[in-house]
Amino acid sequence: MAPRVPTSVLLSDLMVDGDADAMTAFGLIARLGDRSFGLILTVLGLLAMLPGVSAVAGIAIVILAAQMAAGRSGPLLPRRLGNRKLGRAGLAKLIRWSGPVLRLVERIARPRWPTPVRAARRPVGGVIMVLGGLLFAPIPFSNVPPALAIVLIAVAYVEEDGLLLGAALLGGLFLLIGAAGTLWEGMSRLGWVGGIL
């Protein structure tokens, strides 16, 4: 069995492909196959760390993660967006954004405790979808921890690293528990908990 090509290398190879100039979003998804969800979520997670962008990125993250949780094999995009031409310039921009982070994480992430992609897709999508909801919290810098967790989960999923995926999912779970505790405390102070109970 041939060794798995790192995603950063796969993206770089697309730049020298003869069809790079005519590449569309649908074409990129087709070429990436099972990695398409993870790569797009990685880029969106990076964008979600930026102030003022997290809410917009969060909407896209929740939509894509919901598709993963529903068991889709690849992202479902509006036809107008999917047929949009990326070209060589668009691919270069994508590589410039995601390449350094992918290469950094790929030093740690590698196929370990491999989990079948189809088996992991639904639970990973469900966790990312809930983490994406945390990006809408109106608290300064509260977007960074869930966005970072989304990036780690997405990269681990892409690289089929079950060990890193388990650790990242555990970290995401702690974030969700902390967020739930904070929400509960806030509701208690407002006197809403007594009404619910």
Image: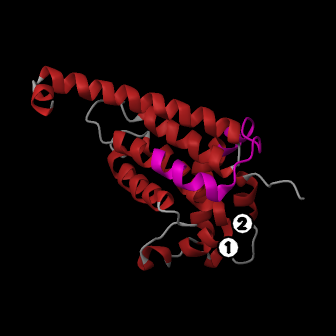
Q: Position of residue 21 (x, y in %)?
A: 64, 75
What's the residue at 66%, 36% (across, down)? 164
The prevailing secondary structure element of the residues shown in magenta is helix
Amino acid at pointer 1: Ala
Secondary structure beneath disc 2? helix
Image-based side of 109 in relation to 66, left or right:
right
Please name the residue shown 63% across and 40% down the image: 165
- Residue shown at the point (58%, 47%) measured from the top left: 154
Q: Is residue 96 magenta?
A: no
Q: Nearer the viewer, residue 185 or 153?
A: 185
The x, y position of residue 25, in whole percent, is 54, 71
Over which residues does the magenta segment extend?
102-127
Residue 11 against residue 16 in the figure, above or below = above
| Contact between labelled residues 1 and 2, with CB atoms less than 8 Å apart | yes
Q: Which residue position holds label 2?
A: 14
User: Of helix, strand and loop, which one carries label 1?
Assistant: helix
The disc labelled 2 sits on which kind of residue?
A: Leu
* Pick the front one: 87 or 102: 102
